[in-house]
Image (tube, grey):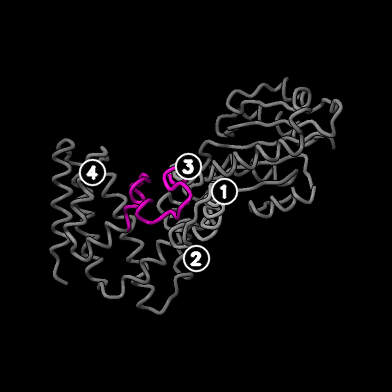
Amino acid sequence: MALLTASALGKTIRENDIDSLYYFYGHDTAALESFTKRLVNKLCPADAQVMNFHKLDGKNLDFPMLTDACEALPFMAERVVVTINDLNIDAVTKDDLDDLKKILGSLGETTTVIIYATVDLFKNKKYLTDKNKRFADFCEKHGTVCNFEYKRASDLGKSISTYLAKSGCTITKSNAEYLANLCLCDTAFISKELEKLSAYAEGREVTREDIDLLCIRRIESDGYSLAINILRGNAAMVFTRLRELDVQNYEPYAIIGIIGFSLADIYRAKLARSSGRSVADVAKDFSYAKNREFAVKNAYSECGNISAERIRKTLEILSETDLMLKTRSRGKDGDMLTLEQGLARSMALRC
């Protein structure tokens, strides 16, 4: 009967405070899936799952099967566990939703239903769609709800160090957080990169050079470095990375979009710093997710010698360039040239 964080949820499970209904959603789907699997194994051990564990597909939910599973008594076990994966209420009819609520609102003490979503149920980066939000509120009244948000890089840094230690490797705190930020604090991406790094390091310390050499750079993690180097007029870095992104087949409009996103972070940080506001103020006022607070922190510390006017004019030039890309497309090569010209104009500013 609560909305819990992932850490608070873990604590209740460890203390055997078990609910009849769980509803899990969130952007960090790797963490969500991992937790769901551990919870299922705790409530219904492997040797009891043949008779007492029922896994249903939320995209094509079989209501008679769900009803039978929820009404069944556990066979030589303490509990029946039912999971429903990828249930999107936006795709459920009103009659089916009413039936689902009747079933979930009257679960027995020996039955636990776990609804977990690995699909996107959000209408924007922060909020669920209206129908999914109302269903989450229903689940909160009858059970436990958890939003698996991305963790901060500092929290993930500890997990990264622990993972590497199991293979005999070490990593500094700053490099662990660097890796987390490079992967945008997405545990699924982090896990894949850690497998490569641990195999490559073979028991030694994982260095910044190892990370840069082996780990796939997501374009979102490039936004800040490109934006700050544009403002500093570092053409060599900007155009080198631009060519790399072109080879990786990123579209010009996607590149300029992520640069503009980071420029907005820098502009907010600059104005906040000029008016005596803190990093925490910016993160709160603009509702930054935990995995993006580092963007404001970095911008706040590095924007001191960059004028607000330069940032503003750069944003104006790139806004014009973005409009050209979206309204006067000339094909990928022509659009890349348009982007390069816009970036060149920005770096040539004298203010």
Number of callouts in the render?
4
Tag nearer the camera, 2 or 1:
1
Q: Which residues are magenta?
A: 197-224
Residue 110, above or below 319: above
Residue appearing at x 58%, y 48% in the figure:
148
Q: Which amino acid, by three-letter code, is at mark 3? A: Glu
* SS class, disc 3: helix
Tag nearer the camera, 3 or 4:
3
Q: Are marks 3 and 4 in contact (CB under 8 Å)?
A: no
What number is the disc on residue 252?
Answer: 4
Near mark 1 (Cα within 10 A), the count class, few <14, some 14-19 or many ≥20, is few
Real-space Cα separation, disc 2 to disc 1, in angstroms: 37 Å
Tag nearer the camera, 1 or 4:
1
Tag nearer the camera, 3 or 1:
1
* SS class, disc 1: helix
Real-space Cα separation, disc 3 to disc 1, in angstroms: 11 Å
Which label's residue is closer to the chain start, 1 or 4? 1
Real-space Cα separation, disc 2 to disc 4, in angstroms: 31 Å
Asked which quadrant contains residue 60, the reply is top right
- What secondary structure is the stretch in magenta mostly built from? helix
Residue 141 locus on image (x, y percent): 73, 46
Residue 129 locus on image (x, y percent): 53, 42
Real-space Cα separation, disc 3 to disc 4, in angstroms: 31 Å
Question: Which quadrant is the C terminus positioned in?
Answer: bottom left
Q: Is residue 207 left or right of residue 240?
A: right
Give the labeled residue for mark 2.
Answer: 284
Which label's residue is closer to the chain start, 3 or 1? 1
Give the labeled residue for mark 1.
Answer: 166
Give the labeled residue for mark 3.
Answer: 195
Q: Is residue 29 magenta?
A: no
Residue 124 locus on image (x, y percent): 47, 47
